[in-house]
Every structure is written in C-alpha cells, then in structure tokens.
Amino acid sequence: MAKVSADQLGSESIGKLLVKQAVPASIGILVMSLNVLVDSIFVGNWIGSIAIAAINVVLPVSFFIAALGMSVGIGGSSIISRALGANNREKALKTFGNQIALTLLITIIMVILGLTYVDSIIPAFGGKGRIFDPAKVYYTIVLYGVPFLALCMMGNTVIRAEGKPKFAMIAMIIPSIGNLVMDYIFIYIFDWGMAGAAWATTIGYVLCFSYVLYFFISKNSELKIGWHHLKFHLPILKEIGSLGFVTLARQATTSIVYLLMNNILFGLGGEAMVAVYAIVGRMLMFALFPVFGVTQGFLPIAGFNYGAGKYQRVRESISTAIKYAAIMASVVFVGLMIFPAEIASLFLSSKEGISASELAVNAYVLEHTPTAMRLVFAATPIIALQLIGAAYFQAIGKAIPALLLTLTRQGFFFIPLIIILPNYLGELGVWLAFPIADVLATMITGYYLRKEMKKELS
C-alpha cells in the first residue's frame, strides 16, 4: 500500500489521497470492529448472553478513559497537521511530547479512581442483577490495560497526522488479532470465562502499545522528540485541550447514553433487553467502519491544506469525503435492513445443555433485536454529512463549532428523546430516538457546514 508523506497531503489529487488515507483507516477500524464483534460472538456462544450484557456495561467506562487518550491525540494531531503544513516542525514536536505526558498523567489518575469506586460504577451503568458479578470481573482486569489503550489511541492519530496511514492501520490490526487468539486460548481452551475475555482484551492493548512505541522510535516517524519536549507548554496544552475536548465530550456523552440506555432497557425488559442493546451496539461499532474510515482519512487532509492556505483543496476534500462516505453508508444500510435476524442469531449460543433461563433470554433477544436494528440504522444513508461536517471544524482548529456539532446528535437530541419517548411508546420509543436524532443533527450540521464554506473557503 502506498505511503503518504506529509508534503503529499498538500499536492496529490484529493480523490487518490482520500483513498490512500481512508482505506487503511477503514481496514484498521474494520479489524478493530470485527474484534469487538467476534469477541462478543465468542463470549455469547462460550459464556452466555448475560456475559455480552456484562461487557456492554463495562465498555462505556473503559472507552471513556481510552477516549481521554484519543481526545489528546486528535486535539494534538490537528495542531501537528497544521504545523507541518506551515513548516513549523518544532511546534509539532512540542505538541507530540505534551500529548504523551498528558495522556499518561490523566489516564493513570482515572484508572486509580475507577478501581477505587468499582462497586458504585458498575450498578450505575446498568450492571444489576445477574449482570453485576461478571461485569465486575471483566471491568477490574480490563481497567489495568486501559492506559496502554489510551496511549495507542493517542499515538494512532499522530501517526495518521504524519501522513502514514498504513502504520496506523497496522497498529489497529495487531491488538484485534491478538485479542481473538487470546480469546480462543483463555475462554475456549482454558475455560477462564469472563476473566479470560478480560485478559485477552488487556493483552491486545499491550500489543498495540508495543507496536506504536516501535513506530515512533524507529526511522518510520518524522517526529523525533527529546525529553525537553515532554515538559508541559501551557499554550499548546490549552490548544490540545480546546480541540481535544470535542472528542472527549463526544465520548463522555456516549458513556452517558450507555448509562441511560442500560438502565432504561433494564427497567423495560431486564437483562435480556440489555443484551439486545449490546448486540445493536456492536453493530453500531462494526457496520459503520467504512464511514468512520473516510472521516479519519479526511481529517489530516483538511487540516494540512487549511494550514497551508490551500482552501480550494479543503473544499474538494469536504465534498469528496461526503460522497465516498454516503455511498458506503448506503451499502451498510441495505445489508442491515435485509439480514437483522441472521446477524442477531450469531451472538446466541446453540450448544446443547444450556439452562432454561439462558434459553429464555436467547428467545427474547432473537425476537426483539431485528426490529431494534432496523430502527436504529434507519437514517444511516444521511449520516455522512453529519460526521464529515463536524470533523471539518475539528480539523481546522475551530473547537467551539466542532464541539457543538459533535454534541448535537447525542447530547441535544438523542438523550432527551430516550428520556421522553419511552414514557409514551415503551421499547419502541427507545429505538425511534436513533433515527430522529440522526435526521435532526444532519440538518443542522449541513446548514452550518455550508455557511462556513461560503464564508471561509470561497
């Protein structure tokens, strides 16, 4: 696969450049998503559907801590892309050094707090009834590996900002393959249950960190920092914080959504309904991988060319990214509308000798998941505009509009909808909240993106 240098971001054809950036990002996201998907299938078949619900309870907590690293990474990478575009290499080095130090400091503190208050956190996120014990086992082990994941997420965005998408892709593939291999060994062969699933995930994080570390100390990276670059530089920290807060706010909102959804659905249908949401949630991570890949590929292209003052190329990158992402989203939409029952059945155990309660949960999940999946993904063809529009403002360093547009779907629309609609429509109201929020958020994002392009990029 062709390697892209930082300078090529400002000279090569936008279409070809977006393919070079987006394909590795999409493959990396696909493999990571497949990891989550297959991991859930293994857990559901080898441990049980309650175990899937338990992992769904833990994910928002561990993902939030990992998102601290991602937010530092994306915030700093926006600075790095623009600094490289403006030929200011020293600022890029200082930014990267500050990203490393800040990620380590924040995530270690969060892990300590997370382990201290474990018995309060798990029930708050819906880990009640039979879900609590397996969720606690999984949570405690996985949390030890989360700082490694945070450093991987931070480093991955910097690798992409350097114009090295192939290496970013490999960094995402390694932990996924490692996790699946360890799943087979720890769960199927050693029969360690939830502890095995947790150790497999943690080892995957460590493998990812090892590769990212190798990239930056090898000749592949252009960012060779010294110890002095790790010293906190207040103006850079402020800029990382203002831009990274967009990603952090998005993930914090996602964690709040998981908290609300798990609790609301537990009240509507108990552990089985939480398992339905766990399967739908896995498909939200997996099915949209090509759209997220285009978005990730778009970020360094837009940031570099904006920093270089090449506004026509920025306009072209926006329109091309939206077109590519919309095509991908439409293909995903068709598949999910046709095969929801077949997808749901993959997560459920068919082995002989499972308990009557497990059989009852499986029957409930298989009955309710297809309708839920069709409603959740009903507005998928239009989300490309929403994602690329919000990403554009983040890429060019405009933190406030990026933050507001990022929060529009989940914060301003979705959370109020899932609180209000179930009171009148029950379970149906929960699933209808997804497409309604998508449509409203896309309309607002489209309006502000068009206004910005006329004002700044004409």
Image (tube, rainbow, N blue to C red):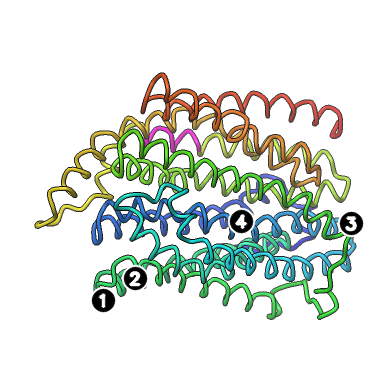
Question: Which label sits on residue 67?
Answer: 4
Secondary structure of residue under mark 1? loop
Alpha-carbon span between mark 3 and mark 1:
54 Å
Q: Amino acid at mark 4?
A: Ala
Question: Which label sits on residue 86?
Answer: 3
Q: Quadrant of residue 66?
A: bottom right
Alpha-carbon span between mark 1 and mark 2:
8 Å
Q: Which residue is mark 2?
A: 196
Task: Count neighbours of disc 2 (C-alpha within 10 A) and say few if under 14, some if 14 to 19, many if 20 or more.
Answer: many
- Please identify the quadrant where the C terminus is shown: top right
Q: Are marks 3 and 4 in contact (CB under 8 Å)?
A: no
- In the current view of this chain or complex, which residue is farthest to the left? 353
Q: Are marks 1 and 2 in contact (CB under 8 Å)?
A: yes
Residue at 54% in and 52% down: 26
Q: Is residue 92 left or right of residue 104?
A: right
Residue 399: image x %, image y %? 78, 43
Q: Amino acid at mark 2?
A: Gly
Q: Which sits earlier in the primary sequence, circle 1 or circle 2?
A: 1
For residue 211: magenta? no
Residue at 86% in and 33% down: 456
